[in-house]
Image: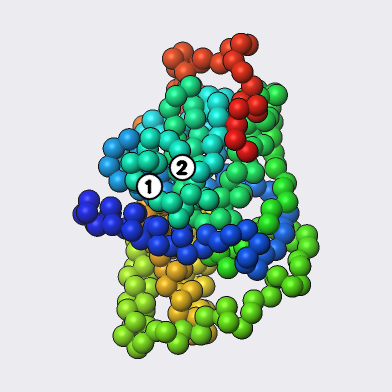
Amino acid sequence: MPSQTDTAEFTTKGGCEYISKYTSPRGSEPCARIKIDVLNVVHKGTPFLKYGKHGHPHFRHFQISDENTHICWFSKGKEVNKTSVAIADICDLIEGQTTKNFLKHQAPDMKPISLSLIYERKKSLDIIAQDENFYRIWMAAFKALLQISEEKGEEGLRALKELPREVEIIMKCPSSDYLMGLAEELSMDNDVLERDEDDVDDGNEFGKSDKNKLEKKRQKLAKYLHALEKKVRKLTERPEHFELVQEINQLQQEMQQIITHTENGAYGQVRDLLFRTKIDMKAIRDKISVIKHSKVKKGTKVLDHLDEKRTASVQWKSQTRPSRLSTTHF
């Protein structure tokens, strides 16, 4: 278990280095335009770097609830009703880093993939995506969910089954393989899709000792993944069991990618995938812990009871409230 100092270093220094590496000016990287159900992606969820009022930012697993009414994250030791925001309560969506929480721990290199959800008039949920691809996916989902909530209310959100959107993804981002697997490819510009030879990672900058360190990290992550698998097997009676199994399968695929890139000598990609997989594993670990220790009744999903937990104190929406669509900075 890492110490508080280790965690701070991992989420600030490591997180900034990893995300900044893949944040590039629009149009300067090989891209593909895909059609993808963004609702499917946000239901599965992804890690975000979450900024809070106290302490350093930390990676947390974020996802939209099955009924599309809440954005939730999993924080070890907290009930999920304490770590969720109702879509109906979000009054503004701001891109960039303008809130007090962001200003406390400024990360200008990550500004293009940062966003804030303003809810209950003055509270803010401040998060940074893993890379620009996931940022674009989540922004497309947020825009659609806010519009549906504004026009049709929570009944409209619950009735929603899919959100197909066209999204341009950057092929160099670590998430591109995962998203391409979920997507229907629409069109590809030949002059930007293919990588130049100079972009191929041949691993020449890595010495033998560096490669050995990468292999040790991979072995350590493999043991970590095995431990997570054992924890999931103990949750077979939980309704979330199948969902967790799918997430473990995704981690196994990431580990296989690491092995493949190692065999191909793409050590730079191995390094970045190791970091990303470590983030994913830690986020899933916290999700497993929250589900395991949840006090919800047997047979009920942790996220299913969120509507029941809402209190009158957050039912502040009224007819006189200005439209969110006119104030949101899209």
Report, in whole angstroms, how far the alpha carbon at label 1 lies from the one at label 2: 8 Å
Cβ atoms under marks 1 and 2 closer than 8 Å: yes
Residue on which the image places disc 1: 106
Residue on which the image places disc 2: 97
The part of the image, by quadrant, that contains residue 181 is bottom right
Residue drawn at (49%, 37%), measured in percent from left and top?
A: 116
Q: Is residue 182 above or below residue 307?
A: below
Locate residue 49, reporting x and y percent.
42, 48
The answer to whether residue 85 is visible is yes
Q: Nearer the viewer, residue 306 or 106?
A: 106
Locate residue 144, reporting x and y percent.
67, 37
Residue drawn at (65%, 68%), measured in percent from left and top?
A: 30
Locate residue 211, reporting x and y percent.
37, 83
Residue drawn at (51%, 63%), measured in percent from left and top?
A: 22
Locate residue 216, reporting x and y percent.
32, 77
Q: Using a 10 Å C-alpha cutoff, classify the residue at mark 2 as few (fewer than 14 neighbours), some (14 to 19) or many (20 or more).
A: many
The answer to whether residue 157 is visible is no
